Image (cartoon, coloured by chain):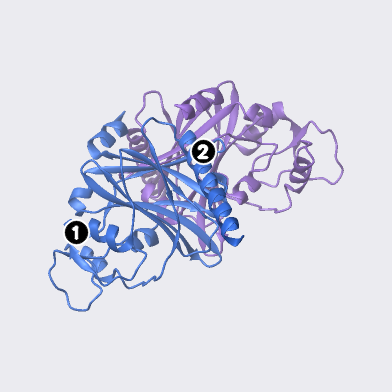
Chain colours: A purple, B blue
Amino acid sequence: MLFFTQCFGAVLDLIHLRFQHYKAKRVFSAAGQLVCVVNPTHSLKYAPTRCAAVQTSAEQGILSPCHHHEAVHDPQLVPCTCPLFSCPWEGHLEVVVSHLRQTHRINILQGAEIVFLATDMHLPAPTDWIIMHSCLGHQFLLVLRKQEKYEGHPQFFATMMLIGTPTQADNFTYRLELNRNQRRLKWEATPRSVLECVDSVISDGDCLVLNTSLAQLFSDNGSLAIGIAITTSKAHNSEAEI
Amino acid sequence: MLFFTQCFGAVLDLIHLRFQHYKAKRVFSAAGQLVCVVNPTHSLKYAPTRCAAVQTSAEQGILSPCHHHEAVHDPQLVPCTCPLFSCPWEGHLEVVVSHLRQTHRINILQGAEIVFLATDMHLPAPTDWIIMHSCLGHQFLLVLRKQEKYEGHPQFFATMMLIGTPTQADNFTYRLELNRNQRRLKWEATPRSVLECVDSVISDGDCLVLNTSLAQLFSDNGSLAIGIAITTSKAHNSEAEI
């Protein structure tokens, strides 16, 4: 009997997700857009000193990745960029994607424009929603984080990082778009490199920031649909000049 | 000597404003856009109960304006909608614009697209920047407010209100756009009616919200340029469906 109840629950969940998927697709109805349902993961760590090495070296004009170990090894090695876990792994930029997929099971999606559907927005902070996005020959990491910058007032922060160098990142522009309830919010910026730390991007507030009340206005049944598009910077600049 | 020093200071100020005006025009370079330099005004009052009457009647489905006096007079009378002053004036909707212009010296600008250039963003909260915008046969009130919702953390809130009824307001969509430093933020929504209270729109967070760090990224020399465009809702809906 318990087995049947559980099966029924699972089917209901699937129907609910399918319904959300359909609604997100209707909101962002451009042809060819892929909707990806992203479940939350409670952050297992928030180490404030994690990026100290990167910030210091960036100030000195040197780009070396942040290291979890005290001794600095090969400067071409990148630590695990997944903000969810305090992971001791480090490797070359070229293998970061396969590490994130295999070890942290982060999904990767193809397509110029996708819809990121984050579920369970009501969960308490800190919580992260993460996917990788493969586009224009590169891989990007989208991080949506619920965090309490001011105690008792959780906010949502969304940013996109290129799994590549800062010089490569400068060639792209990413756009995040929320569209619901006759309201629309768009954020466009140059992605940061994963060599810079997602924690510092969020603490600087240089990303899409949503108060809880705005997040609720854009949410539907506890899920937030974010339309994502990536273009090359040339297109962005010429558009800005029009 | 003092006279000459003051004159020189005034000329420098004018050159500075002219330069800001030019830069704002370059950022929002669509033809026919008017740049309006808006100086801040320290809010003289923030009466939290000011809108209690409106909120209660809105919950009951009745739209009556908020009154400063205890006795409710003619339901067609609107209190002074200028959020800057605790002004005892009340009058019909048709004369609100002339009251705001004459008594509170709020500028009115014509044009489908204008640039609102708010100066002295560093001034402490609470501070307001206000203009009226005449467009598509109606007058709109743009309010940018710096306020500390969380103590010690000032935020900027921008919204547009129609000087008309909520039914009339439903026919329009307003867009606020920030564009600087390879970042772009756009907010689109239906304007609220001035019969609803600007204080409650801001406390609900149903408007463009900027943290101080983001406001600094979009500011230039302490001034924030906001591109404003108003369209009829039909255009907005068809655009959303594309």
What residue occupies the far front of the structure in this picture?
B1
Q: Can you tell which mark lies on residue B23?
A: 2
In the rendered structure, which disc, 1 or 2, sits on the residue that comes first in sequence? 2
- Residue at 46% across / 54% down in the picture? A211
Q: Can you tell which mark lies on residue A105?
A: none
Q: Amino acid at mark 1?
A: Val
Q: Is residue B58 above or below residue A37?
A: below
Q: Are marks 1 and 2 in contact (CB under 8 Å)?
A: no
- Residue at 26% across / 72% down in the picture? B88
Circle 1 sits on which residue?
Answer: B95
> In the image, B26: left or right of B89?
right
Q: Amino acid at mark 2?
A: Lys
Q: Is residue B31 above or below residue A125?
A: above
Give the quadrant of the N terminus of chain B.
Answer: bottom right
Where's residue B113, x and y in %?
34, 38
Q: How many marks?
A: 2
Pinpoint the chain carrying mark 2.
B
Foreground pick, B54 / A103: B54
Where's residue B39, x and y in %?
45, 55
- Residue at 51% across / 54% down in the picture? A155
> In the image, A55: left or right of A210?
right
**What is the spatial separation of the Cα atoms under label 1 and label 2, in whole angstroms?**
36 Å
Same chain, labels 1 and 2: yes
Where's residue B40, x and y in %?
45, 58
Q: Quadrant of residue A37?
A: top left
Foreground pick, B42 / B197: B42
- Residue at 36% across / 72% down in the picture? B47
Q: Residues within 10 Å of mark 1 (few under 14, many from 20)?
A: few
Residue at disc 2, secondary structure: helix
Where's residue B188, x and y in %?
36, 43
